[in-house]
Image (cartoon, grey):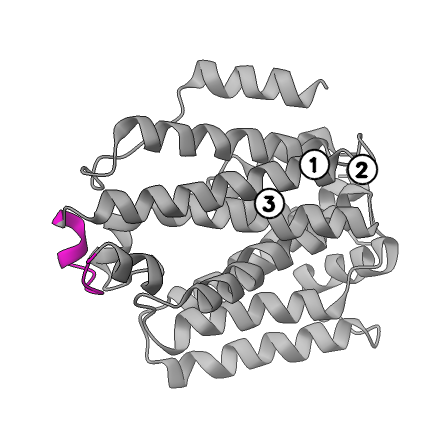
Amino acid sequence: MKAQLGAAPADLEAVEAVVRAAGTSFFRGMAVLPPARRQAMYAIYAFCRIVDDIADDPAPFETRRPRLDDWRRRVAGLYRGEAADPVTRVLLGAVRAFDLRQADFEAVIDGMEMDAAATIVAPTLAGLDLYCDRVAAAVGRLSVRAFGDASPAADEVAFHLGRALQLTNILRDIAEDAARGRLYLPRELLEAAGVPADPAAVLRHPGLARVCTGLAAMAHANFRAAGAAMARCNRRAMKPARLMAGMYAAILGRLERRGWDRPETPVKVPKWQKLWIALRFGLA
């Protein structure tokens, strides 16, 4: 593998291995980027994957918090020019090449700590917004710089697209989250629909459709705002963002067509639609 970002080929291969092992479409999706930007995105993804795995570990939080704090120290070290493992060595090159901000890495860790420290059940709208900003929009703020646009408009894309994607994830994963005792639907929408803040009870409550419809409307509004912000950005740099927006908007549309009374029924975007989205947004 040709060296990128001043990193050794072995480090680049180790980071790619983390992405491949995750088994997501992210690896193929980043193929639209030039090599150095692609490797930066792999390193950002690897960082997110590692801290997310710490947050999802069933071990007591007291044993996980030191591991999250260790990553805070590793992130701080990047901004002193320090790196001691493949992920941080590639990240160091990405920080230098694309001016990635320390605060955004720290926000991602803060979001993982929100999930790890306590089981989230019916957060307020403000709490949900903070959670979305940390676990999704902060990743977006890192990503748009790696994509090639560090403008205020690109940060606006990250703000809105991060929320749109995370709200779509929440709507898709209601049943899966409930099985883990979690409920990310906001308290205000639950109360307005007369739905109890109970992960088990919410699945069969007749008011669930009203709650999900309200949250879906918030996701759609953020998709629209993200699209408007993309129009003010570097078009080539926003290609991966357009692809992600197109794919997640398709997921949200299929959730709406399935209806909200069967949250256990999985929703998948068929291959033909994925190809159409890739052609529409990848070649634009």
Question: Does 215 sit left or right of 41 as displayed?
Answer: left
Element type where label 3 sits in the image: helix
Name the quadrant containing residue 86. bottom right
Tell me the kind of residue under disc 1: Ala
- First reached walking from the N terminus: tag 2 or tag 3: 3
User: Mark 2 highlights which residue?
Assistant: 232
Relative to the observer, which residue lies in front, 272 or 80? 272
For marks 1 and 3, the one nearer the N-term is 3
Q: Is residue 116 placed above or below 43 in the rendered structure?
A: below
Magenta stretch contains residue 261: no
Label 3 Cα neighbours within 10 Å, binned few <14 / some 14-19 / many ≥20: many
Tell me the SS state at disc 1: helix
Query: Mark 1: few, some, or many residues within 10 Å (few <14, many ≥20)?
Result: some
To which residue does mark 1 refer? 228
The part of the chain drawn in magenta is 194-204
Q: Is residue 229 left or right of residue 252?
A: right
Left or right placement of residue 220 versus residue 141 in this view: left
Position of 17 relative to 137 (above/below): above
Q: Is residue 196 magenta?
A: yes
Q: Does the CB distance between marks 1 and 3 fall below 8 Å?
A: no
C-alpha gap between disc 1 and disc 3: 11 Å
Alpha carbon distance from label 2 to label 1: 7 Å
Tell whether 194 sits left or right of 120: left
Task: List x then y, in percent, for residue 157.
Answer: 69, 45
**Front position in the image: 57 or 110:** 110
Q: Is residue 160 above or below residue 112?
A: above
